[in-house]
Image: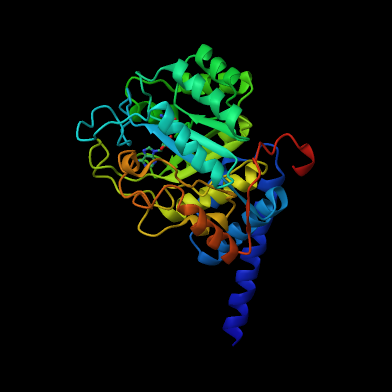
Amino acid sequence: MVFLKIFEKGQETLMSKLDQLLTRISCASSPGVEDLETILSLENPAEIKVLFNFADAVRQKVCGCGILLRGIVEFSNFCRNTCAYCGLNKNNSALPRYRLSMSEILESVARIAASKIKTVVLQSGEDECMDILDLLEVIQTIKERFDMSVTLSLGELNVKDYQLLKKAGADRYLLKIETSDQALYESLHPGMSFENRVACLHDLKQIGFQTGSGNIVGLRGQTLRMIAEDILFFKEEDLDMVGIGPFIPHGETPLKDESCGSALLTLKTLALARIVLKNVHLPATTALGSLKKDFREEALSAGANVLMPNFTPVKYKKLYEIYPNKRCVDEPEGACVSCFTTLAKSLGRTIDYSRGDTLKADKSVI
Ligand code: SAH
């Protein structure tokens, strides 16, 4: 009995120390990287629960209980790059390639609109044969026909093309930095440069896109310090959205023999990102839903406020194989929406059908 009391007291002290540390991180304009590393290295389940609850409280304060939906259309799996982790890399000759026609894209967008979702994310590999003029027309048509915001995720383009896409009506752009460690970045992206990736992010912001980035957790050679630095990079870049997902090995890539990134470390990274970044949109990523178990529910309780139902036509969905065993690839387009509604209810949350623009416009929520 006496022992139990001492243990409880010790636990209590541990918890209040952790609470103090999280409060210090949350209040700091530039949190210390060691503090972030300490949080990422937590292993005690009771402490991890404190972290998740803290992040959940920040999410509630900044975003409320609504979960935003973004309908994604993966319109081409052609790619000129050879990213070491990605199944779309051009050296993967086993993958049949596809590119949606303009009318196929617009049909998918119409399905998103019919589901009352107000954001379409158009994503592709870096497809050299994609005609920018076609894409501009698609964006203009979406903006004319639907009350919808358009997010693009097409990789690195030149400033002129980014400007044209913005002018055509695109609202947002996602370009994940993948890792903020330059040496690790360049070892994973043959022929690409870290400086150019960062320059693209700056161009996008300067042009006026609501800008998103993000990282992959569990890459070979990645340390907790690097992940802590990723979060500081996101803060420095003052992003509107940040996507955080675990690494999942793909059999047709150089990283095929590596193991999956840890779900727990990904969730800790997400929670810490919410505490440090506060007024950003953080999706419960499809990658977190595609490990042995679906961890998106845990993500929504550890800081996430966005889900991304897939509206790629069923016959192409399987071929957008950035990693294997993507959750729900056999489901009809948009089937996830009803599952997400049930999920939201079970968490005491709601689905928010608004556009979900940047949270940075309203400085009062910080
Ligand atoms: N061409 C676009 C889109 C890339 S695919 C671009 O360069 O931005 C979208 C995201 O999938 C990538 O940014 C990457 O973070 C993620 N991804 C790719 N392969 C992955 C893998 N094996 N495991 C986890 N995430 C992966």
Taking the image as four quarters, which one is ligand 1 found in? top left
Q: Residue at point 31% right, 50% down? A: 325
Percent coordinates x, y for residue 315 in the rendering:
31, 42
**Nearest to the observer: residue 47 or residue 141:** 141
> In the rendered view, does 80 fall on the left or right side of 40?
left
Q: Residue at point 76% right, 37% down? A: 362
Percent coordinates x, y for residue 342 in the rendering:
54, 62
**Nearest to the observer: residue 297 or residue 226:** 297
Percent coordinates x, y for residue 212 in the rendering:
56, 33
**Nearest to the observer: residue 85 or residue 126:** 126
Locate the N terminus and report the quarter of the image it occupies.
bottom right
Q: Residue at point 33% right, 19% down? A: 191
Q: Residue at point 66% right, 37% down? A: 357
> In the rendered view, does 274 fall on the left or right side of 73?
right
> In the rendered view, does 25 fall on the left or right side of 323?
right
> In the rendered view, does 230 fall on the left or right side of 331?
right
- The residue sitting at the left extreme is 94
Q: Is residue 182 above or below residue 328?
A: above
Q: Quadrant of residue 311?
A: top left
